[in-house]
């Protein structure tokens, strides 16, 4: 199953909101891996002030807020 990566950190209100909105939209269609940027120095450098960030297949989908249109385009190409 293809998947999304969400870069976030504990205690991030925007991250929590994005993940809460994202999960029901992709359930049974895409895997979601949440990565805490504070567990990896490279992630922390790359995303420290940009979280939450959502990537799919190495490409940026959205940051700060869920882009439902971008997600819908991805889901339209995912087999059901």
Image (tube, rainbow, N blue to C red):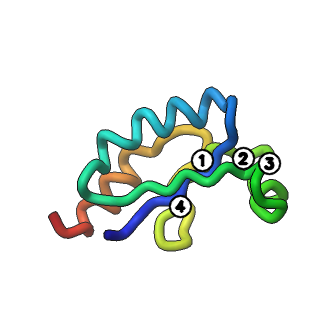
Q: Secondary structure at mark 3?
A: loop
Spatial CA distance of label 2 from label 4 is: 13 Å
Q: Which residue is mark 1?
A: 63
Mark closer to the chain start, 2 or 4: 2
Q: Which residue is mark 4?
A: 55
Task: Compare residues 36 and 53 and report the one nearer the observer.
Answer: 36
Spatial CA distance of label 3 from label 1 is: 12 Å
Spatial CA distance of label 2 from label 3 is: 6 Å
Task: Compare residues 38 and 58 and report the one nearer the observer.
Answer: 38
Q: Which residue is mark 2?
A: 50
Is residue 79 toward the left or the right of residue 57 in the image?
Answer: left
Residue 6 drawn at (x, y percent): 55, 52
Q: Which residue is mark 3?
A: 48
Residue 28 drawn at (x, y percent): 24, 54
Q: Residue at x 33, y 59 (%)?
A: 30
Spatial CA distance of label 1 from label 4 is: 9 Å
Mark closer to the chain start, 1 or 2: 2
Q: Residue at x 37, y 42 (%)?
A: 23
């Amino acid at each position: 199953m293809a998947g999304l990566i969400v870069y976030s950190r504990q205690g991030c209100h925007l991250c929590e909101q994005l993940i809460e909105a994202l999960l029901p939209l992709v359930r049974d269609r895409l895997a979601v891996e949440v990565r805490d940027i504070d567990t990896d120095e490279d992630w922390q450098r790359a995303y420290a002030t940009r979280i939450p960030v959502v990537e799919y297949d190495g490409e940026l989908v959205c940051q700060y807020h869920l882009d439902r249109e971008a997600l819908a385009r991805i889901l339209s190409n995912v087999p059901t």
